[in-house]
Amino acid sequence: MGTTVIQHEGFTHSYEQIGVGIVEEQLKEHAIPMEIKFDEVPELIGDRLTAKVDAVADELARRTSEDAYKKLDESMGKVGNSINAGGKPFSQKIYLEMLEKMEMEFEDTGEPAFKLVMHPDMAEVVRKRMEEWQNDNDFQLKYGELIRLKREAWFDRESNRKLVD
């Protein structure tokens, strides 16, 4: 889903963010304390040890994910392609506005190649709405027109890109 960035030694790294330029950042440390009391040691084997280590790993994963979503929000805000629905329910209008802000690429089949990243609860709402919208001819026309325009923009970008320096 993203580009690989090689991180060399050090605490600072930089990368190019399209629409923003070179971004330089400090690495963020995640430290999860794990306390083992002396009286726990004789019994801390097998499933008990696994459960204790798993609890620390789960907390580390939660914090890392939380930071990743904050970074996504910040990055999208910088380039202006985020949507704030203002508490309104997910709708066709919001979905089309969201797609309109995206720069899309397309598969060899001509189908759009993009992924949406969202909270699992929101993903379930979106999935259900998308199923409903499959039979909405007005929505399908608007969606088809938007995808056609995005495909043309992609063809333009592809035909104008520089293959070698």
Image: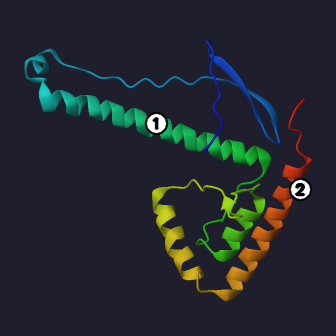
Judging from the image, the colouring scheme is rainbow
Q: Badge 2 is on which residue? A: 156
Question: Residue at (75%, 78%) from the top-left corner?
Answer: 142
* Secondary structure type for disc 1: helix
| Mark number displayed over residue 30 | none
Q: Please give the name of the residue rendered at 21% of the width and 20% of the height, measured from the top-left corner.
A: 36
Question: From the viewer's perspective, is 78 left or right of 13?
Answer: right
Residue at position x 78%, y 46% from top? 79
Camera-side residue of 144 and 163: 163
Q: Nearer the viewer, residue 88 or 48?
A: 48
Q: Amino acid at mark 2?
A: Asp
Nearer the observer: mark 1 or 2; the answer is: 2
The mark nearer the N terminus, 1 or 2, is 1
Type of amino acid at the residue the image marks with label 1: Arg
| C-alpha span from label 1 to label 2 | 41 Å
Q: Quadrant of the C terminus?
A: top right
Residue 78: image quadrant is top right
Answer above or below: position of 146 versus 9.
below
Q: Is residue 23 left or right of residue 50?
A: right
Quarter where residue 58 is shown:
top left
Q: Residue furthest left?
A: 42
Q: Which residue is mark 1?
A: 63
User: Whole-percent x and y of residue 17?
Assistant: 76, 37
Residue 152 locus on image (x, y percent): 85, 63
Vertical comparison of 124 with 119: above or below: below
Q: Nearer the viewer, residue 37 or 157?
A: 157
